[in-house]
Image (cartoon, rainbow, N blue to C red):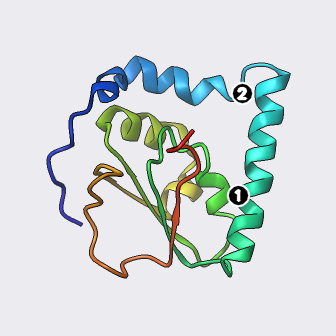
């Protein structure tokens, strides 16, 4: 993977280290958010199953890596995780257990200009971009 210069968009500026840290923890804060995260995981597992349990998955934008443990549930899966924010990637790497991290390769790129070759992955996992 080559790292290109991140695309600077108006909303990109808010994703500093503090915002990334808060983003990581907000889905664990309170019953409603934990239930919402649980539902997101249910939908993601179903989508990955329908996609044939792909082995090479790009998580883009990966944010703070909250879906990495779910993606790592498949024993043969390699996870490429990308985000436009270097701070999001740093927080994600710091927050995950080593058994998950050994299956994740991170890089900085934009969802609007993916810095990967054609057919580099079997599946693009894009849970929250359109949200």
In the image: residue 117, left or right of residue 27: left
Residue 36, image quadrant: top right
Eyeballing the image, is 130 above or below 119? Answer: above
Residue at position x 26%, y 56% in the image: 113
Q: Which mark is residue 28?
A: 2
Location of residue 83 in the rendering, given as x and y in whole percent from the top left corner:
37, 46
Task: Report how far apart the C-alphas of labels 1 and 2 lie in the structure.
Answer: 18 Å
Q: Which mark is residue 56?
A: none
Residue 51, image quadrant: bottom right
Pick the residue in front: 65 or 45.
45
In the image: residue 97, left or right of residue 53: left
Location of residue 27 in the rendering, given as x and y in whole percent from the top left corner:
68, 29
Secondary element under disc 2, as helix, strand or loop, is loop
Eyeballing the image, is 36 above or below 26? Answer: below
Question: How many residues crowd mark 1 within 10 Å: few (<14), some (14–19), many (20+)?
Answer: some
Residue at position x 36%, y 78% in the image: 120
In the image: residue 63, left or right of residue 52: left
Residue at position x 68%, y 81% in the image: 52
Mark positioned earlier in the residue sequence (1 or 2): 2
Secondary element under disc 1, as helix, strand or loop, is helix
Tally the numbered discs.
Answer: 2
Residue at position x 76%, y 27% in the image: 33
Location of residue 58 in the rendering, given as x and y in whole percent from the top left corner:
46, 64
Q: Which is closer to the viewer, label 1 or label 2?
A: 1
Q: Which mark is residue 44?
A: 1
Question: How many residues crowd mark 2 within 10 Å: few (<14), some (14–19), many (20+)?
Answer: some
Location of residue 87 in the rendering, given as x and y in whole percent from the top left corner:
34, 32
Q: Quadrant of the N terminus?
A: bottom left
Pick the residue in front: 95 or 84.
84
């Amino acid at each position: 993977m080559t790292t290109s210069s991140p695309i600077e968009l108006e909303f990109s500026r808010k994703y500093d280290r503090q915002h990334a840290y808060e983003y990581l923890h907000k889905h664990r804060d309170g019953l409603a958010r934990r239930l919402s995260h649980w539902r997101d995981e249910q939908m993601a597992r179903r989508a990955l199953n329908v996609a044939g349990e792909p082995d090479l998955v790009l998580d883009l934008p990966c944010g703070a890596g909250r879906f990495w443990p779910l993606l790592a549930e498949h024993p043969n899966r390699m996870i490429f995780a990308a985000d436009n924010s270097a701070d999001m990637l740093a927080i994600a790497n710091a927050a995950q257990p080593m058994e998950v991290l050994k299956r994740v390769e991170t890089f900085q790129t934009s969802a609007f200009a993916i810095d990967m070759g054609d057919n580099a992955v079997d599946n693009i996992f894009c849970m929250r971009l359109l949200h």
